[in-house]
Amino acid sequence: MKNLLAALILFAAAQAADLDRSRQLLREGKTADAVAEAKDAVEASPDDGAAREVLGLALLQQDKVDEAEENLAKAAGLSPGSAIAQVGLARVAMERKQFDKAQSALNKAKELDAAEPQVKIYQGALQLAKKDYASAVKTLTAAVEAAPDEPYAHYYLGLSHYGLKHPDKTVEHFQRFLDLAPGLPEASRVASLLRSIR
């Protein structure tokens, strides 16, 4: 019995390390590798909410919205306390321009963990998507203050300032985004916008 318990503990630790690696790959813009590793984790443990969450977020980055939603919905069911799964579902709804549904998921995420930086970041992204640039700037400025190393906080804040025609602030946050995450899919768009502003 002790050997079985020890083996289960080692398996769980290895799986957590693999998921951390998948999250890091996703942050570096190595989406295909993140998807592959997260799929392996889901195959090894189909009822692991964290693995489903990482896979859903990685698939979302590949614009595989239906697959992403399926995995994020399962993650939310398996890990009902996960604010990140709700943020992921909000992102799916935003992709589909279902803004009320996105707001509902963000409200749920905030109830689960108001301190989670992704909640503020994607609340600002939703305001940006609705072209409420002033509200987006306010929300995303608070997100950047709370989590200055979150690349997407700078990305969406830069876009919000761009919408308000604030070139200096746009450049500042776009440059910070590129410094933090040059491999993310949005990096080429940001570099192009920076060239047009300068």
Image (tube, rainbow, N blue to C red):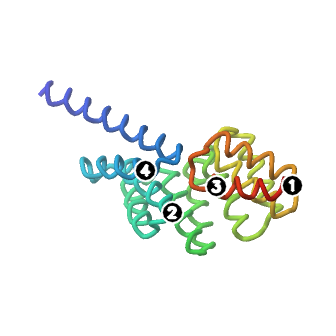
Q: How far apart are marks 2 and 4 (CA)?
A: 12 Å
Mark 2 and mark 1 lie on one chain; the one further toward the N terminus is: 2
On the rendered image, what quadrant is the N terminus found in?
top left
Q: What residue type is labelled 4?
A: Val
144 over 105 or under it: above or below: above
Q: Does the residue at mark 2 contact the one at mark 4 (Cβ under 8 Å)?
A: no
> Which of pointers 2 and 4 indicates the residue nearer the eye?
4
Q: How far apart are marks 4 and 3 (CA)?
A: 24 Å
| Structural crowding at the residue carrying mark 1, measured as other residues with C-alpha within 10 Å and reported as few (<14), some (14–19) or many (≥20) | some
Q: Name the residue under label 1.
A: 167
Q: Mark 4 points at which residue?
A: 54
Please provide percent x and percent y for residue 44. 24, 47
Task: Describe residue 108's horizontal placement relative to residue 25 as left or right.
Answer: right
Q: Does the residue at mark 1 contact the one at mark 4 (Cβ under 8 Å)?
A: no
Mark 1 and mark 4 lie on one chain; the one further toward the N terminus is: 4
Q: Name the residue under label 2.
A: 89
Question: Residue at 51% of width from left, 51% of height from top?
Answer: 84
Mark 3 and mark 1 lie on one chain; the one further toward the N terminus is: 1
Secondary element at tag 2: helix
Q: Does the residue at mark 3 contact the one at mark 1 (Cβ under 8 Å)?
A: no
148 over 193 or under it: above or below: above
> Which of pointers 3 and 2 indicates the residue nearer the eye?
3
Please provide percent x and percent y for residue 159. 75, 58
Task: Describe residue 136's horizontal placement relative to residue 147 as left or right.
Answer: right
Q: What residue type is labelled 2?
A: Leu
Q: Mark 3 points at which residue?
A: 188
